[in-house]
Image: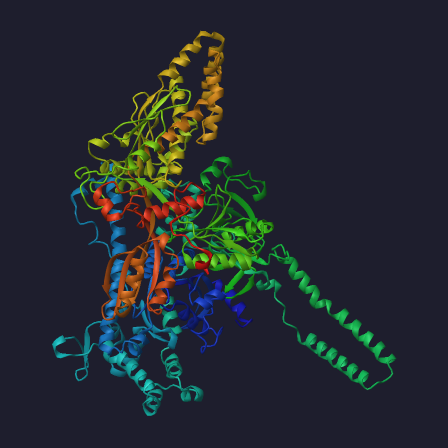
Amino acid sequence: MVLNSLDKMIQLQKNTANIRNICVLAHVDHGKTTLADCLISSNGIISSRLAGKLRYMDSREDEQIRGITMKSSAISLHYAKDSEEYLINLIDSPGHVDFSSEVSTAVRICDGCIIVVDAVEGVCPQTQAVLRQAWLENIRPVLVINKIDRLIVELKFTPQEAYSHLKNILEQINALTGTLFTSKVLEERAERDTESQVNPNSEQGEQVYDWSTGLEDTDDSHLYFSPEQGNVVFTSAIDGWGFGIEHFAKIYSKKIGIKKEVLLKTLWGDYYINMKAKKIMKVDQAKGKKPLFVQLILENIWSLYDAVLKKDKEKIDKIVTSLGLKIGVREARHSDPKVQINAICSQWLPISHAVLSMVCQKLPSPLDITAERVEKLLCTGSQTFDSLPLETQALKAAFMKCGSEDTAPVIIFVSKMFAVDAKALPQNKPRPLTQEEIAQRRERARQRHAEKLAAAQGQAPLEPTQDASALETSPQREEPRGDEQQVESMATNPVPQEGSNQESFIAFARVFSGVARRGEKIFVLGPKYSPIEFLQRVPLGFSAPPDDLPPVPHMACCTLENLYLLMGRELEDLEEVPPGNVLGIGGLQDFVLKSATLCSLPSCPPFIPLNFEATPIVRVAVEPKHPSEMPQLVKGMKLLNQADPCVQILIQETGEHVLVTAGEVHLQRCLDDLKERFAKIHISVSEPIIPFRETITKPPKVDMVNEEIGKQQKVAVIHQTKEDQSKIPEGIQVDSDGLITMTTPNKLATLSVRAVPLPEEVTQILEENSDLIRSMELLTSSLNEGKNTQMIHQKTQEKIWEFKGKLEQHLTGRKWRNTVDQIWSFGPRKCGPNILVNKSEDFQNSVWIGPTGRSSKEASRYRDLGNSIVSGFQLATLSGPMCEEPLMGVCFVLEKWDLSKFEEQGASDKQNQEQIDLLGERQEEDKIHPIGEENQEVQGVCLEPFEKRTSPKGDSSITDCYGPFSGQLIATMKEACRYSLQVKPQRLMAAMYTCDIMATSDVLGRVYAVLSKREGRVLQEEMKEGTDMFIIKAVLPVAESFGFADEIRKRTSGLASPQLVFSHWEVIPSDPFWVPTTEEEYLHFGEKADSENQARKYMNAVRKRKGLYVEEKIVEHAEKQRTLSKNK
């Protein structure tokens, strides 16, 4: 940008009503960055000839090579219309599904968005996803239908066909908006109903029989896209033209003499013009009349393209003169027709004017933020706005007002941190030389040149040396001016300037209220911060400086060190930023990890977390090539974690450093960043670690050759039954229906456990409600600790009952009677998709009410033993018996829990009275001790009395030999759970992607070939109307997806490209332990049955990776001897 316009930008930032914060959203390759180029070129930042070729917003090298955007980046544009001047903060976002987390970060800080749709491909899967993201954030969309030139040049449509095709696309998008709107209305309706059931006295109680669902009354006309509303623009970004209907309505109202308002309503739709009567009529299809849109708009564009493509010079000249345009000689003579079209159209229908005027008219300014959006942003978790403290509710007014006075609270949301090279920061850039300095340098250069000449001519050497020394000193005296400047500017840079780390982190943020000033102190609120806690600790009306406040968890205090104006690839320094603007903040890297809320008042809650569409699923282990470089790798991974909103960094129990990313392209980008920017070392990357889950199923009814089990003759009952026996060690009883009974090593307690598969719907409900289960867990643990629990909010309570109701609805039948009330725990990690059900008579405990109200010693004792059993269940569900992967969809039922011997042992202790007194004291202490949810605490503190109780018998070896009783219970429970799984039919569950592929009919066969080779399953295929494109929806195991996109592109010569999104877990039908047992199976599969078993292949691969025992022959086909001569 030209330097003098920075002042212009600063001036424009102050007028909040004329600011527009917008992001460009679309499916991959629909033309977002090209459109952004066209808008940037209107500000003179890049040449209009390069718009679309330069892709200015794609500043990374790999973005330019791959041709896709990988990050969201912002730029500020100036647009003047009718004496009004607007500041447009434009954010370009990626369309590739792997980077959809970047879309979430962009959408949060915008007020409106431009949805771009390719005129040929129409609505694609990612278009739906971004529209949903915009909808969830309550931001208003406008539509740009791009690449209209493809309808003319590639598909060779007539104007009439193009019109019906465009109408079709609009209908599809409006149908999508309609479904989003309907679901919202129905949700609100459902909420109202639950409220009216809770308060039957309220007036709404009578609405129970009203079946209208409120859809008829709610006005939704403003939501839909239609050209006559002015929220649709038709463009071809690569050719630099675009128009809204308004532009043509103005022209034709003068030409034809029909009012502009009438034309605005009729230019889109089935209307035609009767030129004689100068009237606009409804189209009668039979007469073959052309709609106005075709006749007055499309035909003109078509004829222009036709003339240029056929190189009809006379016609081109005629068009140019009739439009009153001036075309340069270079463009007029150019051999490439695209250049001519661009030259004519960009003057006739400039795209930047069409898009930016629509943005300024139709999208809201920061002042127009809706109350609904503010309330949604401030309510984290399951809270409602009314339940927030009054100080917090008062902030809503500040949001709505968006005031810039000093009293207004400063509220800033940081949506992501991004890394820039420290050299690119404004304070480190070389400053431009002044005229005097240039003159001095010129003089110096002349003198040096004169010396050289003199020396060459062999003059007396003495004088020049003096001269030269004088000259040499003067540069040294002069030079420091530049140097000092450099040193000072380095000093202001907050980044520690080490030789290796030249990356500086800048926060991508927006000011929602108040003015952000450089050097101002501000609070950084983490996502778990609670203003309620702060208000409890700090008295009302506090006026202490921020540093003197008592420490509050998840809150830090920092200084806004540098504020930047984001200009695509450039950054400009700012002193202050008024409300409603997008900005970059330097110096927050030690305070903010990925996103945060900055506020001058601690009564502000952290904003609701960003919702990411893509789940990170692809894991790889990373290690340095040279082990000595491990510290650089760890440091580099920390920086990468901060710089990418979606990536996750874990250190596994095995000590591996694991990188979890959203897909293959995302993984590649993270690895490149790690090697070249953050760690700057050579790294070796493992094969992808593919997650699996283990489960059990109902016993199958037919065998592998579809014979009914039990009917056919078992000729060879081979190693199968023996194997089953060997799985279960001695001393463990197994019933015919799979009930496992085990005794602890000291023979004092006996447990009976059975494993039952959960119905699919229940597993799904448990997965969806994991957050709710976690909050229930926190509540019960705080109850157990005897803390004054935070008031459970009514809304949360309702959600818990609703969740319980759903479970009861699906767990019906004799087998599941009363199961829901007896759920004791969820697992793994206390919030997973497995349940532990307690059916023992002695001890009743349920996750819904906490332990039963007895506060007697007996209850507390049982509770401590119960904690050990739950811990055993947690360990068992965390790593299953097949390949140490977590379990999913299993219900463990604790049928019996016999502690009679343990009781007897306790009773016999009473012989020693002193011991009993001591025990009583210890138990009192035990009641006081809070019992945490951590297992270690349970083992360590709370269970000492029981060990004490066993020792006085004189035979202390019982305790010493087997360790503490709590530990024995944990181990026994874990083993019992594992054995109860192994007696049931075990299955592996694989993670599945949904795969959307767009392909032309001639490569359809090849797409199917690649899918079937990789165990994919096609769900549906449909043809797009008006094109020869097919849309294929399929599911594909994550394990088979590596290299899938590349292979499809190679096999189809680049005509089909897939989009992969993680969708669900699916049971692999084959049994990993299957061996042939009947004659038919022998005949069919052979004695070794070594045909490929997918589940066994996956299981063995995971076991090998984890270093577990794998049952496979080291030498295969030993009878085939290979001699050396053969081997040559």
Q: Is residue 407 above or below residue 250?
A: above
Q: Quadrant of residue 267?
A: bottom left
Q: Residue furthest bottom?
A: 314
Q: Quadrant of residue 561?
A: bottom right
Q: Quadrant of residue 204?
A: top left
Which x, y percent locates residue 54? 46, 73
Pick whichever, 771 or 138, lies toward us. Answer: 771
Pick whichever, 238 or 327, lies toward us. Answer: 238
Pick whichever, 397 or 557, lies toward us. Answer: 557
Q: Residue furthest left?
A: 286
848 left or right, relative to 289: right
Q: Is residue 946 above or below residue 821?
A: above
Which x, y percent locates residue 78? 46, 69
Q: Is residue 9 visible?
A: yes
444 left or right, relative to 830: right
Which x, y percent locates residue 990? 34, 48
Pick whichever, 160 or 1071, lies toward us. Answer: 1071
Figure disc tally? 0
Q: Is residue 692 above or below residue 429?
A: above
User: Which residue shows up at 62% across the image and 63% down it?
Assistant: 428
Which x, y percent locates residue 622? 50, 51
Type of colouring: rainbow
Q: Is residue 37 above or below residue 839?
A: below
Q: Is residue 122 visible?
A: no
